[in-house]
Image (tube, rainbow, N blue to C red):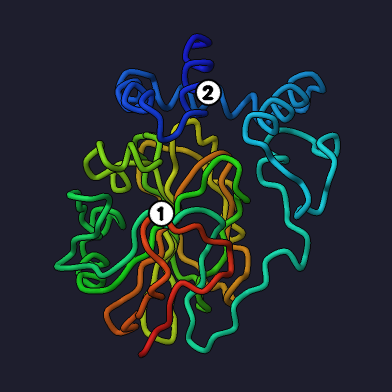
Amino acid sequence: MAIYLPIIYYTTLYFGSPIMNLFTTLQQLVPQQKLSKVAGRLAASRHPYVKRTFIRSFAKAYNVSLDEYERQSLNAYESFNDFFTRELKEDARPIDTTADGIVSPADGVISQLGQINDHKMLQAKGRHYDVGQLLADSEDGRYFADGSFATVYLAPSNYHRVHMPFAGTLTKTRYVPGTLFSVNNTTAANVPDLFARNERLVCMFDTQYGKAAVVMVGAMIVAGIETVATGKIARTDDVQEANHDMRFEKGDELGRFYLGSTAIVILPKAANADWESTMQADSFVKMGQLLGVTNS
């Protein structure tokens, strides 16, 4: 098992380089779940040497600055997980106040955004996948068959908490077990149905324009997904569903990734979403930044 950790670590450092072709192939070969379990144990360790080594190596590799964060010393974190899910300063991410606006749920890069056409969502150029498959529910899939979506990829150096892109009431969460491929652009371009195959947590909401969803997609070495409603999700081989009645305002914290990943916003046709012209694939975004407006 130990041999895989440095391979994955160093290939992950070179997003966008030729080595990514090798990285895509390696993901087919490594024991994804076991690797993530090992990574999770190390990331949760509070042993001084382990946490210090991981935190400092990661901060150096990804040139992490703590200027925007509440705790500004690498020594202030109790574990690598604590560092990875570090909290921002209170005023670091103002939430856009445009009427009927949809804001980015996370810091990251727009992977894709646009309309859902006859159940199909764009994953990467030339690749589409089914919204019902993503949500692991055919009825929900039919509901969003002609809606709209925005996919935000969180790079390793990004702020890794996910916030509400709209106001709504959480009605259901659905944990869907799956693979743990990386979710960077190279993998998205090469692995069919990537987001609908990976482990994920589907969060369903009632909003002013009907049902809407935020999907938190796990990835290679993701040690876990947590929300304020569920706590940290326990991995199982079966789909887990839970009902909720929890109100969120736009910009409220929804959850966090322990390593990884991607957040997908899904809106119904009734929202009539109009995405900002500046928001395109590969656009950098900050949590709370305006993605578009609804016209319901």
Question: Looking at the picture, how far across and down is residue 140, in whole percent?
Answer: 27, 67
Q: Secondary structure at mark 1?
A: loop
Locate the C terminus and report the quarter of the image it occupies.
bottom left
Rendering coords of residue 90 (x, y %): 77, 65
Q: Is residue 128 shown left or right of residue 220?
A: left
Residue 9: mark in rendering: 2
Judged left or right of residue 272, residue 284 is right
Q: How many marks?
A: 2
Residue at far left of view:
118
Q: Earlier in the sequence, mark 1 or mark 2?
A: 2
Q: Position of residue 295 (x, y in %)?
A: 37, 89
- Where is residue 275 drawn, in percent x and y? 37, 75
The residue closer to the viewer here, 87 or 244, is: 87
Hey, which quadrant is residue 178 in on the image? top left
Distance from disc 1 to disc 2, alpha carbons, whole Å, reads 23 Å
Say which element carries label 2. helix
Identity of the residue drawn at 20% across and 70% down: 145
Say few, some or many: other residues with alpha carbon within 10 Å of mark 2 (under 14 / 14 to 19 / 20 or more).
Answer: few
Q: Which residue is mark 1?
A: 282
At x 30%, y 23%, the residue is: 25
